[in-house]
Image (cartoon, rainbow, N blue to C red):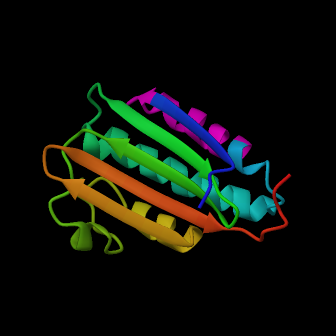
Amino acid sequence: MAIKNHVKMSIQSLSENVGIARVTAAAFAAQLDLTLNEIEEIKVAVSEAISNSVIHGYGNQDGVIEFIMNLYDDKIEYIISDYGRGIDDITLARQPSYSSDPERMGLGFVFMESFMDELDIRSEPNKGTTVKMAKKIQSNTAH
């Protein structure tokens, strides 16, 4: 499947950069004929994934988050990777209200799963986590 558009960013793991990633994800999605609600869902899913990298992946310490956006004929894809702590048990981490931080609601993966059509999480303890998510699009919606 050929990529129609591709953007790759490196983001420092600061909570201030979550908003930048949200806006960038929305701007990338704006090349499609999506509803405002669909764009809002993408923004929430991306900000949850970036927040997870900042808070859980790096424990609010310095690190790099790779943020890739791909547009294909049939979907728009967002890939967020960090090189932090990783997730010991992905199945457990995907459960509603589970969080490694008791101060958190633990709904990040739940939001990603409900707002996006595809969600794939790969992680290795002490090596990092990659979240790949996509929203399917109609073939006639690209500008």
Q: Report the side of 28 relative to 109 (left or right).
A: right
Q: Report the side of 143 relative to 57 (left or right).
A: right
Q: How many numbered marks have been drawn onto this rendered protein structure?
A: 0
- Residue at the spot x=59%, y=33% of the render? 20
- Residue at the spot x=44%, y=33% of the render? 15
Q: Is residue 96 above or below residue 68?
A: below
Res. 97 image quadrant? bottom left
Q: Is residue 72 above or below residue 50?
A: below
Q: Is residue 58 above or below residue 104?
A: above
Rendered location of residue 9, percent (x, y) = 51, 31
Query: Does the magenta-highlighted stretch encompass residue 21?
Result: yes
Q: Report the side of 126 relative to 128 (left or right).
A: left
Rendered location of residue 115, percent (x, y) = 58, 68
* Magenta segment, prevailing SS (helix, strand or loop): helix
Res. 66 image quadrant? top left
What is the magenta range? 11-27
Rendered location of residue 109, percent (x, y) = 41, 65
Q: Is residue 31 visible?
A: yes
Nearest the eye: 132 or 95 = 132
Rendered location of residue 44, percent (x, y) = 58, 55
Q: Quadrant of the N terminus?
A: bottom right
- Residue at the spot x=21%, y=50% of the render? 86
Q: Report the side of 134 relative to 73 (left or right).
A: left
